[in-house]
Amino acid sequence: MNEFTINAIDELPLSMASFKADNPKAVIQIIHGLKEHKKRYYHVAEYLQNNGYSVFISDNRGHGYSVNQEYPLGYMADIHLLVLDQLEITKYIKSLYPEKKIYMLGHSYGSMIARTYLQNHDNEISKLILSGTVAYNKFINFGLILGRLINMVRGEKGKSFILQTFADNNNTSWVCSNKETMEKYNQDPFCTGYKYMNVSIYNIFKAMKELHNFKGYRCLNPDLPILSITGEKDPVTKGAKGLKDSIYSLEKIGYKNIENIVYKNMLHE
C-alpha cells in the first residue's frame, strides 16, 4: 500500500492510496460516500489486491486529508467538481496502466458521483459497480428551495439545524449491522467529528437532482456493464420501489447492461 497525493485541476491535493497487484487483471477506482474517508476501504482494497486487482482510492475533497483553506473538512463541493476530481484520478491510473481496464466502484454518495461521472466520461471506464445505490427523492425540489434560502440567510459556511437534520450522523444504526465496524465509525473524527456546512447539504441536494437530469447524459458507452449491489434493509435505496427507479433511470439514459443484486437482511454497508 502506498499513500500519496495528486493535484486536482485547481491544485487542491487529493489524498490517495494505491494497492498494486502484479500484472493486475484490471484496476479498480473506488469512490467513498458521505461522512467518511478512504481508510475505511483499505480492507476492501487489500482483498481485491490479493485477488489480482490494483486499487486506487482517494479522500473526496472536503473529506479526510483532501482539504485546504478553500475546501476544509466538512465542505462538500459541487458534484461536477467531484466528478472532475475522479476524472483526474482516472487519467492518473491510465498513465500507469495504459493497457488495463478500469472498473469504477462508488459506494453511497460515491454511487451518485459515479452516476454523474457517466454524463460525459462513461467511455473512460469498462465496468461500474454501484454499492448502497442512492435512490432519487421526489421531494428534492423542496429541498433545493429550502437549501437555497438557508444559504442566503445563514450563509454558506453556517450549520443550520434544519439542514443538519438531512445529514444527521448521530443515529448510525442504519449503516451497518457489524458492531465493531460501527464502533470504529462512531469513534472516527473523520466520520463523526464534524458537521457539514449549509453549502455542503445544498450541494448534496443538487447532486440528487442530477440523477434525473436525463438530458445531461451523453451515453457514449451504452453497453457499459453496470452492477448495483444493495442491502434489503438499506433505507438509502428506498426499497424495491427506489431500486426500480434507479434502474429505470439508467435504462432511460440508454444503458443496456444493468444487473441488480439485493442482499437479504443487510443494511447500507
Image: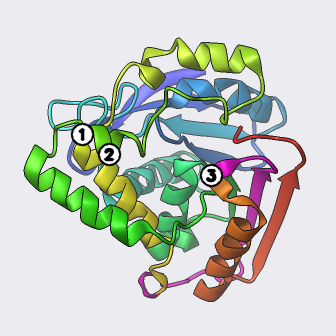
Q: Is residue 133 left or right of residue 167?
A: right
Dot 3 alpha-carbon crowd within 10 angstroms: few under 14, some 14 to 19, many 20 or more: many
Left or right placement of residue 217 versus residue 183 in this view: left
Q: Quadrant of the C terminus?
A: top right
Disc 2 marks a residue whose amino acid type is: Leu
| Mark toward the viewer: 3 or 1 | 1
Q: Is residue 88 above or below residue 67?
A: below
Residue drawn at x 64%, y 13% as measured from the top left: 183
In magenta segment, residue 232:
yes
- Mark number, residue 236: 3
User: How crowded is the residue under tag 1: few (<14 C-alpha within 10 Å), some, or many (20+)?
Assistant: many
Seen as rendered, the residue at the extreme front is 162
Q: Work out whether mark 2 precedes mark 3 in sequence or the reverse, and give the earlier one.
A: 2
Quadrant for the N terminus in the image: top right
Image point (74%, 83%), residue name: 256
Depth order, front residue of 233/92? 233
- Residue in the picture at 77% in, 54% down: 229
Residue 257 position in % (x across, y down): 77, 77
Residue 133 image position (x, y, % from top left): 65, 56
Question: Which residue: 76% across, 62% down?
Answer: 227
Residue pointed to by mark 1: 160
The magenta segment is: 215-235
- Mark 2 residue element: helix
CA distance for labels 2 and 1:
5 Å
Residue annotated with mark 2: 163
Q: Quadrant of residue 91?
A: bottom left
